[in-house]
Amino acid sequence: MCPRAERSGRARALAVPAAQGVDRVLITRARLRRRIRELAAQLSEDYAGGEVVCVGALNGVICFLADLMRELSVPAPVELVHVDRFLEGGSHTVDMPNQFREGLRGRDVLIVEDIVDTGVTLRALVDKVRAEAPATLKICALLDKPAHRQAEVHLDYVGFSIPPVFVVGYGLDYEGFYRNLPFVGVVDSAVWPPALLERPKSGSNLD
Ligand code: 5GP
């Protein structure tokens, strides 16, 4: 697409009421679609002849998981996990209260993540899945923000590596809004992460 057409496409994407407050488009709908097709092609090749159980953490993963799984050519049962994150005694902790419904023991499991920032959430999810003794475990993240990494995690598949900005859209929210945007945008004014993380434990599900 020529730069002028792309610029006007981005301006149109930001003009809808649901995008009010979003400062710029970081990843367009078209780029997301293209990259997700590439990831799915790679995954379908890597898991060819078998199946892959996709484990996603709610709610941010909804758009990515829905689009990715529909592009996979191998059988792909899905398991969804609720994640509560809080700041406790100055450190970032994660709680995943629900049990897996799919038995993961001995199966090929793929954690599908929307975004990896500090890596603390993913680390907790990896530990929870590992405790089920899967045959293999790999990780596919749509967005990787390596600048803030605190926990060691290895990402096997990455959609886009992005700078340390606060992004919304395509499943990612700010105060519950913007999840339904079809692109990934930047809210420059968002206070992230301290003000959001320091909410009281009850009702502090950030995602
Ligand atoms: P981590 O534990 O890696 O720091 O954070 C992972 C979770 O924090 C993500 O699942 C997401 O809920 C939230 N998060 C991290 N960075 C962003 C961001 O830029 N935008 C939004 N909306 N959420 C983010």
Image: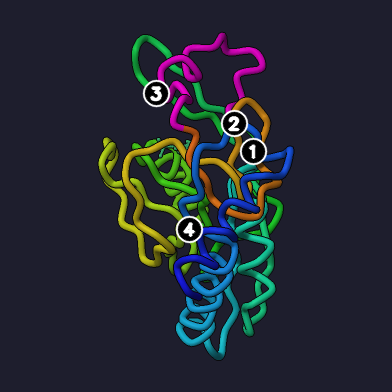
Task: Identify the mark at residue 82; answer none if there is no mark.
Answer: 1
Residue 199 vertical position relative to residue 102 in the rendered view, above or below: above
For marks 2 and 1, the one nearer the N-term is 2
Q: Position of residue 108 (x, y in %)?
A: 51, 71
Q: Is mark 3 within 8 Å of ligand 1?
A: yes
Residue 124 vertical position relative to residue 203 in the rendered view, above or below: below
For the point 34% across and 56% down, the residue is: 161
For marks 2 and 3, the one nearer the N-term is 2
For marks 1 and 3, the one nearer the N-term is 1
Q: Position of residue 132 (x, y in %)?
A: 52, 53
Q: Amino acid at mark 2?
A: Gly
| Residue 81 lies in quadrant | top right
| Residue 179 lies in quadrant | top right
Badge 3, how many Cα within 10 Å: few under 14, some, many 20+?
Answer: some
Mark 3 vs mark 4: give the one in front: 4
SS category of the residue bearing label 2: loop
SS category of the residue bearing label 3: strand
Measured in 3D between alpha carbons, the distance from the residue under mark 2 to the one under mark 3, in whole angstroms, is 27 Å
Quadrant in which the C terminus appears: top right
SS category of the residue bearing label 4: strand
- Front residue of this view, candidates 182 and 2: 2
For the point 47% across and 19% down, the residue is: 197
Task: Identify the mark at residue 21; answer none if there is no mark.
Answer: 2
Q: Amino acid at mark 4?
A: Leu
Measured in 3D between alpha carbons, the distance from the residue under mark 2 to the one under mark 1, in whole angstroms, is 28 Å
Residue 150 vertical position relative to residue 139 in the rendered view, above or below: above
Q: Amino acid at mark 3?
A: His
Find the magenta span and give its range: 188-207
Q: Amino acid at mark 1?
A: His
Mark 2 vs mark 3: give the one in front: 2
Measured in 3D between alpha carbons, the distance from the residue under mark 1 to the one under mark 4, in whole angstroms, is 18 Å
